[in-house]
Amino acid sequence: MAKDTYLKKVLGSERYNRIRSSKVLMVGAGGIGCELLKDLVLTGYGQIHIVDLDTITLSNLNRQFLFRKTDIDKSKSLTVANAVQSFNYLNSNLIPHHGNIMDGNQFPIQWWSQFDFIFNALDNLEARRHVNKMCLFLKRPLMESGTTGFEGQIQPIFPYHSECFDCQAKETPKTFPVCTIRSTPSSPVHCITWAKEFLFYQLFDEADSTELNSADKIAGETDDKDQQENLAKEANELIELRNSIISKDKDVFFTELVFKIFKTDIERLLLIDTLWKSRQKPNPLQFSEYESELDNLIADDKNTSILTDDTKVWTILEDLYVLRKSGESLQKRINSGDESSISFDKDDEDTLNFVVASANLRSSIFHIETKSKFDIKQIAGNIIPAIATTNAIISGFSCLSGSDYFKVDAKKIGTDFSSFMNHSRTVYISIRPNKYITSALLSEPNEKCASSSLLSRGVLRISKSDVKAQTLGWLVNTLIDTYDYEEEGLSISLGQSRLIYDVDFDDNLGTKLIDINGFKDGELLFIQDDNDELENLELYITITGEGTLTTLPEFKLRPKKEFAEEDEEDYSMEEVDGNRDTIIIDDEEEKAIDDIVIEEPALKKRKVVE
Amino acid sequence: MATQLRLRSAKILLFNLGAIGGEVIKNLVLGGLNSITIVDDSTVKEEDFAAQFFLPNDDSIVGQLKLPLVIDRIKELNNRVNLSIDTSPLSSIISNPDFLKQFNLVIATELTKTELIDLNSTTRKLNIPLYATGGHGSSGYILTDLIKHTATSEKDAGNVLRQANTKINRVKTITGVSYNESDNKETITVLDEYCPIADIFNSKELPNQLNKRQMKRLSAAFPLIFALFEIPRLEDPESIVDKDVLKSTALSVCESFGIPSSLVTEEYLEVFSNQAFAEFAPVAAILGGTLAQDVIQYLSQKESPINNVLILDSIKSEMPIYAL
């Protein structure tokens, strides 16, 4: 077979063979993930695990090329793994996992340790930080990537040799879970995002709702009868509404729109009791109260001046008027045949008016402050859409740069990644007349980064027999022997900063490890040198089978570094650099699982007597 | 909106559906362009399975005409784009103005220098913008002859207001400026002028736009990519380009462009001799993404498109653009 002729030429036989026999993990199967998985499969990676917790929505289809309309509401990870089979020419072994990467039960550290290389294709900071931390624990190389509009970057991370994800403070984008946008908005921006990305998009833009989930298709996707009915109902209503743009006259379209979107849909939300336990219930719009006044307004052409009153915050009546006028105009444009669909553009008055009016109407239903057209234009303009081509380019660089790791024999270098520091590069897309990208050699870890430098990390593999038979005192002595602490010169915290031992608190020394509350698989031990000479140590507890050998990570603790106060201030200044309120819609809905999510090393000690 | 209208009325012709062609078409179809015609008379070869992801996963298709096998899978991405295929020989189309004039924009992938220059002489006559792209393993290029392009965009105004009719460089001119005092922004119109692709191959402009340091840092990918335009495509995908032939060709390319011959290093010669004309999925993704993005840029008329040579060197992670 000569299917891999080119791969052998480009990668070289040795590197290609290493890639063929490697096991890699891709976290995230969205915009970047679809593109990246294609590149990884075509590059011939031996085994690729894919993790995503999300299901596919309509708005994913125009940029996530592995998904089809029939895939809506299906698991992203399972769907991509199936979809790439159509071009899995080199028989990569694809293993999807539907779940949250931060779930320590589904993805414990032993599971992570099987991978040679990890590719991030995520869209939120929390999950990225978690993957970063796991890679630091295991000293596994990580390829970080991200895109926003036309910009994007990749960052290869070689633990403790190059900067880690946390070494540079990240500008926190405002991300919203989908359910906040669709069901429980609480601020103007939620309603504006909904109006622009959901309502407007589904009514006027590319979304091809004519084929969207007919009832029988939905039936194949879920066994839950109620859910089937609900999905079918919503989908059918939306199809009807979109169709009525063409088939019905302007009065009927407008009335149907107002009733479905601002009354029926809200009433349906009200039926879900759990949503409103700690929230104020929305009030569906009572259109009849406004109907006659609205007719009067429409009758007088002079009132079109409302449409251009950009700085006034419109009343509900005025919002209805603007919705009616802009909807009519958009309907006319579609029906004239010049445009088969219309995309939102903040400089296109009809689209802006429609979004402003519907966002404000939704705001008033949910008891949220309404905004002027001028304000909403600013906010809507800063909602950066994901762009398919940017994802394609960044995924290409991610795959390309990731393949560099396999130039060397991992068995020989182990966790000494120093050779990559001379050629591995971060790459940013920055389009200029004389270049398309900017790249830079990797930087050393930031000394002030809590994740990368203040402490050493490793996995404590402790046998079940030792957990049963040995005491905390034995563990203390083992630590002293292994890491050269002074006698009685250390303190140990377990889990979330709970002190179990220090020189003044030796009550537990005679306690068997198994009897120490919380000493279990997946927990963290945090060890500090009381003399402040050695850096901190964080150990991840993994309990191995009876009779296995207990092992501690082999490294020498480095001297602790002191930092001047003003440096700390500099660092915090860097954190506040976002001058624009960038809004990114987060497709993923994250469940925080605090099992092994670790933030800054906890320094506060709390004494607990067993 | 005008942009959307232009996108949805664009009729695009794509030559060759190889690795980069496949990436280009995927991106354009997802982007919702009006109609795309693909011209490719090739049959499926074993090595195509490396990076051409629209091919069915079936070894028995080797030897069959490629386009009829992939067209339905491309259509699946967005059934509102009008896709058509044409498997007549490239040579009969390149020199056929009656066929070419149906299109607003032409994208040529993996053409030879002669084919490219022939095609460009016709697209020039017909006033049709032309993009050309190709790859050599981990490197590749995009060449453009978009004839003339005007882009209008809003920029923050600086201390000194921009003036109309100022030349930014040899190929870019600010033709219009209007200042909006209320938000301190300027609406700027930039005209890009392009030369025929044949002139790119004979350009003496490079030394004029690089300073000493930039010239020293110029990637060897530049002369080597142009050298491979002078060397026939390999018949056998397993074979490699003779290093001595490549070296002497690259040296004469350096001389012609007026760049130092010392650029052509042993490391790059080795890489290019091995990887010449090879397809590689991640590189195809980068070039296909960049090209499709630029086509959308061209049609939207908001920012200037690539003018006129982009080189991808993934050894140094660079994508410089030169105006030749």
Image: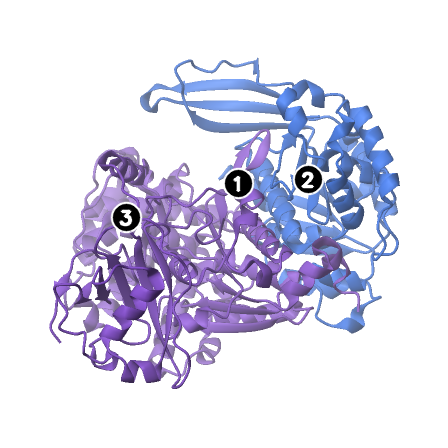
Q: Do labels 1 and 3 share a chain?
A: yes
Where B79 sits versus B10, above or below? Answer: below
Q: Which of marks 2 and 1 is in front?
A: 1
The kind of secondary structure element at disc 3 is helix
Which amino acid type corresponds to the residue marked 3 in the rendered image? Answer: Val
Q: In which quarter of the image is residue A73?
A: bottom left
Mark 3 chain = A
Q: Residue B104 carries which label?
A: 2
Q: Name the quadrant of the N terminus of chain A.
A: bottom right
Chain A, hue in figure: purple
Q: Please, what secondary structure does the residue beneath circle 1 have?
A: strand
Number of labelled discs? Answer: 3
Q: Which chain carries label 1?
A: A
B207 horizontally vs A186: left or right: right
- Residue at image mark 1: A441
Q: Colour of chain B?
A: blue
Disc 1 or disc 3, which is closer to the eye? 1
**Toward the viewer: A62 or B139?**
B139
Which residue type does callout 1 highlight? Leu
Q: Residues within 10 Å of mark 3 (few under 14, many from 20)?
A: many
Quarter of the image containing the C terminus of chain A? bottom left
Distance from Cα at disc 1 to Cα at disc 3? 38 Å
Choose between B152 and A356: the one closer to the eye: B152
Secondary structure, mark 2, is: loop
Residue kind at label 2, given as amino acid type: Asn
Provide residue A277's location: percent of width, then percent of height: 15, 69
State how far apart marks 2 and 1 are (Cα). Answer: 41 Å
Mark 1: few/some/many CA within 10 Å (<14, 14-19, 20+): some
Are discs 2 and 1 located on one and the same chain?
Answer: no
Q: Residue at image x 44%, y 28%? A: B154
